[in-house]
Image (cartoon, rainbow, N blue to C red):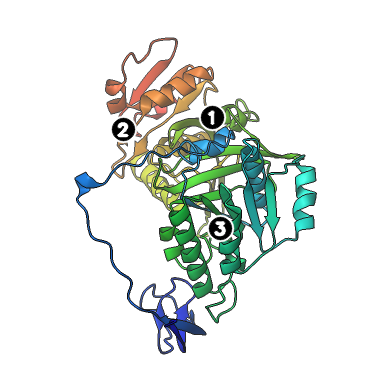
């Protein structure tokens, strides 16, 4: 007998996807207020499927997988070496940031291997995709375009066509005929993703999903969406700047926190093979409030410029603003400087910026922030051939950070000659001070000032 269908009314939280049979003012799961909305769901009652017999871990045979190498090295980097067959990849980003452009270029790179690729778009017409392809100089007979929105039709199309990759732009425009709610609702996004996930795993078909983001920067839809997929990539950048960064926040087949750097040009996204040189290309020399810090993004060292502006303000109205860094961390370091160095900052506005539009979250940024703040406060410049790196504790101590040798090699490669680092890291580096790089160990913020302003 075919499964019976039953329609019922449920209230679903738009933030986390929590379901309730009655309306609630506050979601019990995520504690958000006024987020439960009424929706109609179609429930199917089917016969119980035969469960598979468990097998021993030793009896499970390892399956050899061959990744799809895109030949776009920055994408292969963030994906862990290429696209794994049967994986589901979610790309999120602000509107107009270049997600559709990135996907079309990715398909074009794979089409050079004479493989059929299916691009399903629910937001644009086939003519619009064609216009973008002409702008990007893409003309491949192996890329097929579909403007279908129904998930069941997409799955049937993929089974008939058997492409090597399926791209869906975007998941918020897809819907299932078995769900009564509108496309973009929590239920539709979750169920559409679940059906596409079943297709990916059953046929070893990699599926690439595009997801919209909310005002706070998170991917729209239930939080379970990010747990269902294998890889989550965030496409970051300011539309007013040419730099674009693809950041890995989840990857079951590679390292996380990996980044790929692109530059937006007239003919599409171009890879940036030397991000350090790009971020430092317009660095001002002999200007107070500027210092270079070597950061580690995944497996890649990147040198970035930390800028600070400290100016006097009206008492009680001082501002603390950080772009590209944690504002709470900036407030913490400001308090440490006032306590340990005796400087007066409560009546000063403090603005901090990581140049180039990149965001740094690691603790190694602390020392760069402190040096930039002191340089701007005292109107004294830092030697342009100096880089700084280290974590600052609440007691004013400067703590060690990881992968210091990798940071040292990158700074040396770009011609820097002085590296101010934690004293404990100095003891761990093999061959420190060789090859023309002078390493300066510091233990506390009290002893930091002696090494900063040379010739002053």
The picture quadrant where one finds residue 170 is bottom right
User: Regarding mark 1 in the picture, which secondary structure is present there?
Assistant: loop
**Residue matched to label 1:** 380
Lateral position of residue 328 relative to residue 126, left or right: left
Q: Nearer the viewer, mark 1 or mark 3?
A: 3
User: What residue lies at 53% left-to-right and 62% top-to-bottom?
Assistant: 216
**Residue matched to label 3:** 159
Q: Earlier in the sequence, mark 3 or mark 2?
A: 3
User: What residue lies at 46% left-to-right and 89% top-to-bottom?
Assistant: 8
Percent x, y of residue 120: 64, 58
Above/below status of 49 relative to 101 = below
Give 323 or 270, whichever is nearer the viewer: 270
Lateral position of residue 199 relative to residue 430, left or right: right
Percent x, y of residue 348: 52, 49
Looking at the rendered image, the quarter that the N terminus falls into is bottom left
Q: Are marks 1 and 3 in contact (CB under 8 Å)?
A: no
User: Regarding mark 2 in the picture, which secondary structure is present there?
Assistant: loop
The picture quadrant where one finds residue 128 is bottom right
Percent x, y of residue 420: 40, 25
Q: Earlier in the sequence, mark 2 or mark 1?
A: 1
């Amino acid at each position: 007998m075919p499964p019976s269908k039953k329609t019922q009314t449920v209230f679903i939280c738009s933030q986390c996807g929590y379901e309730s049979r009655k309306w609630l003012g506050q979601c019990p799961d995520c504690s958000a207020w006024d987020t439960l909305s009424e929706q109609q769901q179609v429930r199917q009652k089917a016969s119980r499927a035969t469960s598979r017999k468990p097998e021993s871990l030793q009896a499970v045979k390892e399956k050899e997988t061959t990744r799809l190498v895109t030949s776009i090295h920055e994408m292969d980097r963030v994906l862990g070496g290429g696209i794994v067959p049967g994986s589901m990849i979610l790309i999120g980003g602000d509107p107009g940031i270049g997600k559709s452009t990135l996907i079309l270029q990715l398909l074009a790179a794979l089409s050079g291997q004479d493989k059929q690729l299916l691009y399903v778009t629910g937001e644009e017409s086939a003519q619009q995709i064609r216009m973008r392809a002409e702008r990007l100089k893409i003309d491949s007979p192996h890329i097929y375009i579909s403007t279908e929105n129904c998930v069941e039709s997409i799955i049937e199309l993929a089974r008939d066509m058997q492409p090597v990759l399926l791209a869906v732009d975007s998941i918020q425009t897809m819907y299932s005929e078995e769900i009564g709610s509108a496309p973009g609702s929590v239920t539709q996004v979750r169920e559409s993703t679940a059906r596409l996930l079943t297709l990916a795993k059953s046929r070893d078909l990699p599926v690439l999903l595009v997801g919209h983001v909310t005002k706070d920067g998170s991917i729209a839809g239930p939080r379970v969406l990010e747990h269902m997929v294998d890889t989550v990539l965030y496409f970051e950048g300011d539309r007013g700047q040419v730099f674009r960064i693809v950041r890995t926040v989840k990857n079951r087949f590679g390292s996380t926190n990996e980044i790929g750097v692109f530059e937006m040009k007239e003919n599409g996204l171009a890879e940036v093979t030397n991000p350090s040189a790009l971020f430092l290309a317009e660095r001002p020399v002999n200007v107070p409030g500027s210092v270079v810090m070597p950061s580690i993004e995944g497996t890649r060292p990147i040198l970035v410029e930390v800028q600070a502006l400290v100016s006097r303000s009206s008492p009680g109205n001082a501002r603390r603003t950080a772009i590209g860094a944690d504002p709470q961390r900036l407030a913490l370091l400001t308090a440490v400087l006032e306590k340990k160095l005796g400087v007066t900052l409560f009546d000063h506005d403090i603005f901090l910026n990581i140049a180039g539009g990149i965001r740094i979250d690691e603790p190694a940024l602390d020392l760069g922030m402190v040096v930039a703040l002191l340089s701007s406060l005292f109107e004294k410049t830092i030697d342009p051939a100096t880089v700084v790196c280290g974590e600052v504790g609440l007691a004013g101590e400067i703590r060690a950070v990881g992968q210091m040798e990798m940071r040292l090699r990158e700074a040396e490669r770009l011609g820097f000659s002085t590296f101010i680092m934690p004293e404990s890291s100095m003891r761990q580096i093999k061959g420190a001070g060789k090859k023309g790089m002078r390493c300066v160990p510091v233990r506390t913020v009290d002893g930091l000032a002696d090494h900063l302003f040379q010739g002053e």
